[in-house]
Amino acid sequence: MAESVGMETRPGQEVVKPASREHGRRFLNAYRVELAMLGALALLCVVLSVLSPNFVTAGNLRNVLWQVTAIGIIAIGQTFVILTGGIDLSVGGIAALSAMAGGLLMTSGGAENVAIGLIATLIVGLMIGTANGLLVSYGRLAPFIVTLGMLSITNSLTYVISDATSIVGLPDAYRFWGRGEIFGIPLYLITFVVLFVLGQIFLSRTKPGRFIYAIGSNEEAARLSGVNVRIYKTLPYAITGLLCAIAALILSGKLGAIDPDTGTGLELRTIAAVVIGGTSLFGGKGSLYGTLIGVFLIGILNNGLNLLRVNAFWQGTAVGVVIILSVLIERISRRR
Amino acid sequence: MSELLLQAHDITKRYGGIDALNAVHLEILPGEVMALMGENGAGKSTMAKIIAGVERPDSGTLEWDDALVTFRDTRDATRAGIAIVLQELSLIPDLSVAENIFLVHEDAYRGGWWLDRRNINRATHELARRLGWDLPVAPDRKVSDLTVAEQQMVEILRALSLDARLVILDEPTASLSAHEVDILFNLVRRLRAQGTSFLVVTHRLEEVFALSDRITVYRDGKLSGVFETARTNQPELIRAMVGRDLGDLFQIRQRRVPGEPVLTVRRLALGNQRTGPEASLTVRRGEIVGIAGLVGAGRTELVRTIFGADRAAHGDVELNGRAGLIRSPEEAIGRRSAMVPEDRKAQGLLIDLPIADNVELADLAANGGFWLRPREMHRAVRRLQDELRIKAPRLWQSASSLSGGNQQKVVIAKWLAIDPDLLILDEPTRGIDIGTKFELYKLIDGFAERGKGVLLVSSDLLELLALADRILVMRNGAIVAELGHDAASEEAILAYAVGDAIGSAVPG
């Protein structure tokens, strides 16, 4: 939510309320959906820690954080896309293709230039994302259709260029992003935190961030107010492409191999996280904080079900129920 | 036993901390037309919605036919015999006229299931005949193909098809031409003679005097007065609505000598025409140029093309000395022009976003750097809020919490923030109360006084006559006349707009 600083007055009158109380009210009002979901998350954690003694262990916490990172990085971009009223169904495919293309480039000709591999991956991700964005904004095609088609294309291309085989035996330097640690904290987690913070600053304190909300709220009004809608509608998709590439590098790094089916299912999970976090699919309403809560909710839910030795096939049901409940909560909270 | 058809007592309705209605009353007799007047935010639409079951009051009672009633939803109200036609059209675009009218009538469906098209088409004709009304469109036409005025007629037909004893009309003539207004009024009079009552929520004083038997006035959510139409007059009503005496409308405009041209349009043809009318016009600094014409004359299309919102086929738009077609609103703003669009909710505002964000938007797009500057912007917003007297308790609340008049002020504030040299306004006071209208008129005149150019599209002839230095009349996509301030009159404008121009050569 966009924020303005200062005290509120009516024209010609003295300050009506002390600033701090007014800020508090504003905060509660602006983030009421997110706070509701935070409550749900807290409840879930409490229930799980009661039901399973292994929940609150350091090892389990690591597991949860890994889950969160994998979905979370891409969910940042997905949040931007959905805020503009669009959707990106191709994220899994972008992850796979960018990682595979970069990996092949890296290992081709025998030479193992890690830097080339990494940069190529990022560039491919960025390019595919930009292609999505251009088709949506300049081509004026529906995001659902464009990204659905792109998902199909990228998946198939990944198998084509890799001949359906994984790249194994990745050099350590390449794997550092997925496996490395700085001061005992996994690099992937630091990456996620940094990206999240950058994303939040982008969304709430910059012009493009404000325009993303504007376009999602009322694209025509934004256009008539002088916003270059085409550029700012392309941007979220491009960013998402890049984030997919980063996530793919981390995933392959940790795994030690680049699989052609990297990122399968990421589209549904990232969209679920964004929606559970209270962002409206119609655009214009929502926040990254909500997505963070959504990502944790899904991550902890999956983790909890594992701990409780629930049949893995039930996880889909659990996530689905949470999605529906969260949309209901969003509807009720927004009704005022 | 009283004679009253409807009696609303002590009705209170609160929206998020603001009292829309504060213990108000309303009485309607059978077979009468009651006008409900007041400024925006006075509560008239809210009361209409409560009576029709669209909203429920927080407290108070409703008596219908001397019996206490509670309407849980519009179906309850409909079953009791109350129908409403709201300002926002609620037709289903992909269905036909007849299907829309008879959507919820049970006998439209054979065996309760199958929609009988022939039946409802015939029933539509019969309905029109019974009302003594020449059906303006065929019942099987798709609603989305109709003009806004025709759609409004269909809405009214739908309400009347319910055989209601009380029909509520909320600003019914907003999109209707004078001719269509006549038809509607005759219809209302005929039905009134048959015993149907009408509650007409309106701003338009001429219509109130033409049609109503009694007038109820609300002010700031409270009852301000009930008048018999035959025994009251315009100043009394205005005083009841606004609580003060208003100066003459025609005192607002100040005489100015126009300066250099700020806008010169040469042979502009709109985007989808290969051959067609070309428009040429000039607006000078300090000048207010009005554009009149019937609905569908092409006024909005023309100004949108000038602003770059729609594409032009060919022509030249010289703005502030720079020539060339304007291809986007972004470019128009770069050349120091601005447009307040026709539909403030759909085109002018980001309705879910905070008021402050809305006011900042154009300035941000035109002049903003990468980083937002909250303190500066907030100061600018507050300055504009003071200047325009926007009544908003909290600037961070969403724009949807404002009344229509204040919403329009927000849109205008957005444009004032970039200090344009040309301001285009398309129906700026539609659906706005008299008090705010006057404020906007003074604003528009003040804007011209500062040496800017104004292009004003309006269906309100009085408004044009009061403000404009010159009035251009459009018909069928072309500018057919130009009337100077002293030569202009309602009759002259209408004559050109409708087409039977007396001495059809364009003057001057």
Image (spheres, rainbow, N blue to C red):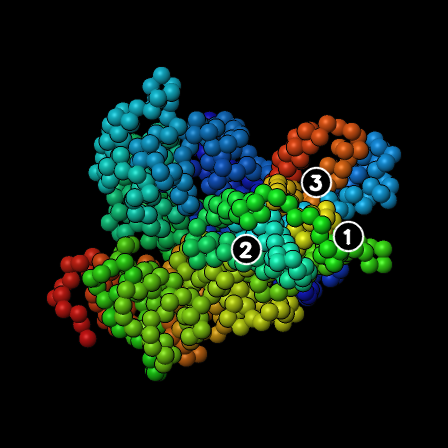
- Tell me, for residue B422, which label it has, or none: none
Amino acid type, callout 3: Ile
Q: Residue at x 19, y 75 (%)?
A: B508
Q: Which residue is mark 1?
A: A179
User: Compared to A244, does B84 lie above or below?
Assistant: above
Work out which residue is located at the far top of the displayed protein and give it: B111
Badge 3: few (under 14), some or many (20 or more) residues near its Cα, within 10 Å?
many
Q: Are marks 1 and 3 on the same chain?
A: yes
Q: How far from the left and from the top, in percent, is residue A26? A: 68, 55
Q: How far from the left and from the top, in percent, is residue B55? A: 52, 38
Looking at the rendering, which quadrant does residue B279 occupy? bottom left
Q: Which residue is mark 3?
A: A298
Chain of the residue displaying label 1: A
User: Compared to B323, does B172 lie above or below?
Assistant: above
Q: Is residue B437 left or right of residue B364?
A: left
Badge 1: few (under 14), some or many (20 or more) residues near its Cα, within 10 Å?
some
Amino acid type, callout 1: Arg
Closer to the camera in the image, B61 or B274 = B274
The mark nearer the N terminus, 1 or 3, is 1
Looking at the rendering, which quadrant does residue B457 occupy? bottom left
Q: Is residue B26 visible?
A: no
Q: Is residue A302 left or right of residue B444?
A: right
Q: How far from the left and from the top, in percent, is residue B462? A: 33, 62
Q: Marks 1 and 2: CB-CB under 8 Å?
A: no
Closer to the camera in the image, B230 or A157 = A157
Marks 1 and 3 sit apart, C-alpha to C-alpha, by 23 Å
Q: Which residue is mark 2?
A: A129
Q: Residue at x 30, y 32 (%)?
A: B98
What element does badge 1 sit on?
Answer: helix
Of tags 3 and 2, which is closer to the observer? Answer: 2
Q: Is residue B299 left or right of residue B400?
A: left
Badge 2: few (under 14), some or many (20 or more) residues near its Cα, within 10 Å?
many
